[in-house]
Image (cartoon, rainbow, N blue to C red):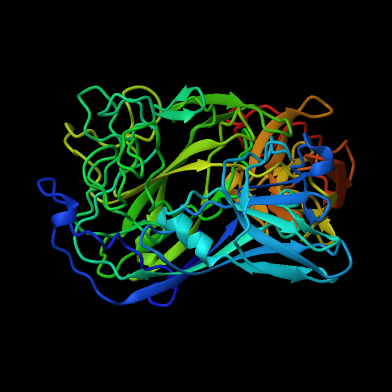
């Protein structure tokens, strides 16, 4: 298991195993009439939500859109809008408190009172203007903002409770000032600062016993109602979500969970089928809205809380690291399960695409697909029953030809590997109800519409390279260790970066495997792995290139370390040779940088034009 954070369910927000209004699912009996076990014990927890969109308007520029790094309020007609997604809260959570927090950046001087109101209509941060802004009900709290930069908070508990309970539509918060002067706050676009947050403390009842059947909630147009289910505007959703389908049609993943062994996040809700039958959340996962009417809706499962680091961008042809929470209830005995993840990088309404790609920094062509986490083993023995673990899960190279737009994703935890269709890679389906397996026995599927944050840029790149263990003259056939460190000083957000280190022929990594390269970061750099490629050297002889393609957050760094086998090419009668090596790095918004290191090596006493070691270069891509 990768780096993990394990917590006891009894002391934090982890013990939320189901909707307590219902007991075990029985296909012959509505959920509302079944027997159930309830207790009065409750668990408490906290979620810290980042804004999903924000913008400001100003009366002097009635048709201007101000979707930038600041939010501004003053008496001259400047108002701000901030919205949050509350659907990660468990459906049966009782909100104990909710606090809106914005960071005042110090502009402007003087004390100013800032009001918070409830927005009463839909808006989009990319098109919001003074003339098209929705109305705001100014019935919320106020806070005095002084001169010093500081975190400012407002108690918005009642608004959050109404949104969560469905008593009001969640269109977000409005902010204004009624006293002279003005105040500026950082927006979510100012990602190197402190973006708007909504901190919610809640409590939950202890789970009853019984099975927890589960389905996904991504749009599926091949449903029981014959209703078009849109994935994106103008794009039908054809993700396999509905389970009871005829032969020849891909079935959505269903998890029976007769015993609850492990699931994603802190919460799993019971449902009979994705688009029909009883559902512990109230509406079905897809097609049935809160009023019970059939319509073009999806993403209705309120138990989708397993993916923890949602606020980053997927770049085409880059790998990422997902933080995924897995809970293991008391009494669980299963030792291993598999995690799979899909990403609809073409935005065509399915998870089945694959294509060659070129990394953002260039380099050899790579394979990418929408199946981005492939049968990742989850060692449940490392999670004590009654606790959870936050796992760092590496992805494959992501196919994403529509960067910056929302994308549907699917996470499936199951006791069996992903189901492979007759043609192509696994596409998010589950076992067919007419197959021998019939369904997954255990686990959970969570579907998420991921909304990427604005793109970031690197700051000042600093590259260092050194030879770690070359004291004196390195003997012929010896080994030295190269260490390359890339620092990102500043920056406006996570952004693509690269490291390239071409080894002079006939030097080569030892062992001659990508797994022999160690990649480390104290945080903010992904992925923690490197690759190898081959390229012609100055003399035409093939030379090995060590490649790292990834992402660096502001003020982060990454270190690449590997050993090389030393066989210098010398002229006759040459006793020693100085071997110089130059590493290069760069990335989005930053100019290329370089660093070099050298050491002395013994010559073999004869001319060598080819590597002494037998290394197979045919398996490496050409750089």
Q: Is residue 531 above or below residue 87?
A: above
Q: Is residue 370 left or right of residue 482?
A: left
Q: Is residue 58 above or below residue 544?
A: below
Q: Is residue 229 left or right of residue 480?
A: left
Q: Note whether residue 539 is visible.
A: yes
Q: Position of residue 456 (x, y in %)?
A: 74, 44
Give the position of the C terminus as an image quadrant: top right
The residue positioned 77% from the left and 42% from the top of the image is 66
The residue positioned 13% from the left and 62% from the top of the image is 35
Q: How many marks?
A: 0
Q: Position of residue 538 (x, y in %)?
A: 84, 28
Residue furthest to the left: 28
Q: Position of residue 408 (x, y in %)?
A: 48, 37
Q: Is residue 302 left or right of residue 618?
A: left
Q: Is residue 376 left or right of residue 35?
A: right
Q: Is residue 181 above or below residue 229?
A: below
Residue 14's image quarter?
Answer: bottom left
Q: Note whether residue 481 is visible.
A: no
Using the image as rendered, state which of residue 230 and residue 74 is in the foreground. Answer: 74
The residue positioned 46% from the left and 30% from the top of the image is 231
Using the image as rendered, state which of residue 78 and residue 253 is in the foreground. Answer: 78
């Amino acid at each position: 298991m990768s780096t993990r954070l394990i917590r006891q369910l009894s002391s934090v927000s982890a013990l939320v195993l189901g909707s307590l209004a219902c007991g075990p699912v029985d296909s012959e009996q509505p959920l509302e009439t079944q027997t159930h076990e309830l207790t009065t014990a409750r668990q408490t927890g906290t979620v810290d939500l980042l804004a999903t969109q924000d913008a400001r308007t100003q009366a002097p520029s009635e048709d201007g859109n101000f979707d930038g790094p600041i939010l501004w309020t003053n008496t001259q007609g400047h108002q701000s809008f901030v919205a949050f997604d509350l659907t990660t809260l468990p459906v049966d959570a009782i909100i104990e408190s909710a606090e809106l927090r914005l960071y005042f950046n110090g502009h402007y001087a003087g004390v100013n009172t800032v009001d918070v109101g409830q927005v009463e209509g839909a808006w989009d941060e990319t098109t919001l203007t003074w003339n098209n802004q929705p109305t705001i009900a100014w019935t919320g709290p106020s806070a005095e903002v002084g001169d010093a930069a500081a975190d400012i908070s407002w108690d918005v508990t009642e608004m959050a409770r109404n949104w969560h309970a469905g008593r009001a539509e969640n269109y977000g918060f409005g902010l204004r000032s009624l006293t002279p002067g003005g105040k500026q706050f950082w927006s979510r676009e100012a990602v190197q600062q402190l973006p708007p947050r909504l901190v919610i403390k809640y409590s939950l009842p202890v789970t009853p016993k019984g099975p927890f059947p589960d389905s996904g909630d991504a749009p599926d147009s091949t449903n029981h109602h014959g209703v078009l289910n849109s994935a994106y505007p103008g794009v039908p959703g054809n993700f396999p979500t509905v389970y009871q389908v005829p032969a020849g049609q891909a079935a959505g993943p269903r998890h029976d969970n007769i015993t609850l062994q492990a699931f994603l996040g802190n919460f799993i809700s019971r449902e009979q089928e994705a688009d029909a039958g009883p559902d512990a959340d109230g509406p079905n996962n897809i097609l049935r809205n809160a009023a019970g009417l059939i319509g073009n809706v999806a993403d209705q499962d309120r138990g989708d809380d397993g993916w923890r680091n949602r606020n980053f961008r997927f770049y085409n042809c880059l790998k990422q690291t997902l933080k995924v929470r897995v809970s293991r209830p008391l009494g669980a005995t299963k030792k291993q399960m598999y995690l799979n993840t899909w990403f609809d990088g073409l935005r065509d309404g399915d998870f089945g695409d694959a294509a060659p790609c070129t990394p953002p920094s260039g380099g050899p062509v790579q394979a990418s697909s929408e199946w981005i986490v492939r049968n990742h083993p989850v060692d449940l023995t490392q999670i004590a029953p009654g606790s959870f673990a936050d796992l760092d899960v590496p992805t494959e190279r992501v196919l994403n030809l529509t960067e910056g737009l929302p994308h549907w994703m699917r996470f499936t935890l199951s006791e069996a590997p992903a189901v492979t269709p007759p043609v192509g890679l696994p596409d998010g389906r589950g076992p067919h109800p007419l197959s021998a397996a019939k369904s997954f026995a255990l686990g959970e599927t969570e579907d998420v519409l991921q909304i990427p944050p604005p793109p970031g840029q690197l700051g000042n790149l600093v590259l260092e390279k050194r030879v770690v263990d070359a004291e004196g003259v390195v003997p012929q056939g010896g080994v030295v260790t190269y260490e390359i460190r890339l620092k990102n000083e500043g920056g406006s957000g996570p952004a693509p970066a690269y490291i390239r280190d071409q080894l002079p022929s006939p030097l080569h990594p030892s062992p001659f495997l990508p797994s022999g390269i160690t990649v480390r970061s104290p945080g903010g750099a992904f992925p923690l792995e490197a690759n190898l490629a081959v390229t012609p050297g100055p003399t035409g002889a093939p030379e090995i290139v060590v490649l790292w393609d990834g992402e660096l957050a502001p003020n982060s760094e990454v270190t690449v370390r590997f050993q090389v086998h030393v066989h210098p090419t010398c002229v006759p009668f040459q006793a020693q040779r100085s071997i110089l090596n130059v590493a290069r790095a760069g990335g989005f918004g930053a100019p290329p940088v370089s660093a070099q290191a050298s050491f002395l090596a013994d010559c073999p006493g004869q001319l060598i034009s080819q590597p002494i070691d037998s290394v197979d270069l045919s398996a490496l891509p050409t750089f």
